Image (cartoon, rainbow, N blue to C red):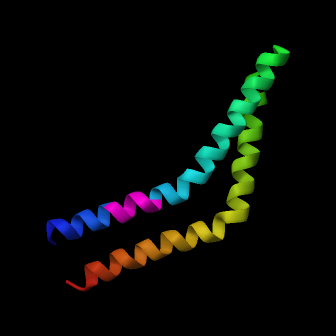
Amino acid sequence: MTNSQVMDVMHSGILVAVKLAGPMLILSMGVGVLIAILQAATQIHEQTLSFVPKLILIAVILLVFGGTMLEVLQDYAYELFALILSK
């Protein structure tokens, strides 16, 4: 493999990781900020109050977008196997 091929594989791998983890991380951070504001306003500092909504949100995201995420990961795996078998 040449250096450019390795860089292309690494670049597409990073893009796949961002596509898979990005929506969950961004939305869970948003929920975390909203809950932190709520906790600061009400002075309720319970740890499970911030954990449970994030967990529910991530479960909903996986249920809704899980098929699409799997397709992205499968396409990347097929691309890697095609690159390996072409040698």
Classify 26 as above or below 43: below
Query: In what quadrant of the picture does the N terminus appear?
Result: bottom left
Q: Main SS of the magenta segment?
A: helix
Query: In what quadrant of the picture does the C terminus appear?
Result: bottom left
> How far from the left and from the top, in percent, is residue 33?
69, 31
Q: Is residue 34 left or right of residue 4?
A: right
Q: Quadrant of residue 27?
A: top right
Q: Is residue 68 left or right of residue 50?
A: left
Looking at the image, the residue that sits furthest to the top is 43
In front: 77, or 30?
30
> How far from the left and from the top, in percent, is residue 78?
41, 79
Looking at the image, the residue that sits furthest to the left is 2
| Residue at 75% in and 55% down | 60
Q: Residue 41 magenta-drawn?
A: no
> How far from the left and from the top, in percent, is residue 45?
77, 17
| Residue at 71% in and 40% down | 54
Q: Which residues are magenta?
A: 11-16
Q: Quadrant of residue 26?
A: top right
| Residue at 27% in and 84% down | 85
Classify 19 as above or below 51: below
| Residue at 52% in and 59% down | 19
Count how many numbered circles sit on residues in the image.
0
Classify 29 as above or below 37: below
Q: Is residue 35 left or right of residue 68?
A: right
> How far from the left and from the top, in percent, is residue 65?
67, 64
Looking at the image, the residue that sits furthest to the bottom is 86
In front: 59, or 72?
72
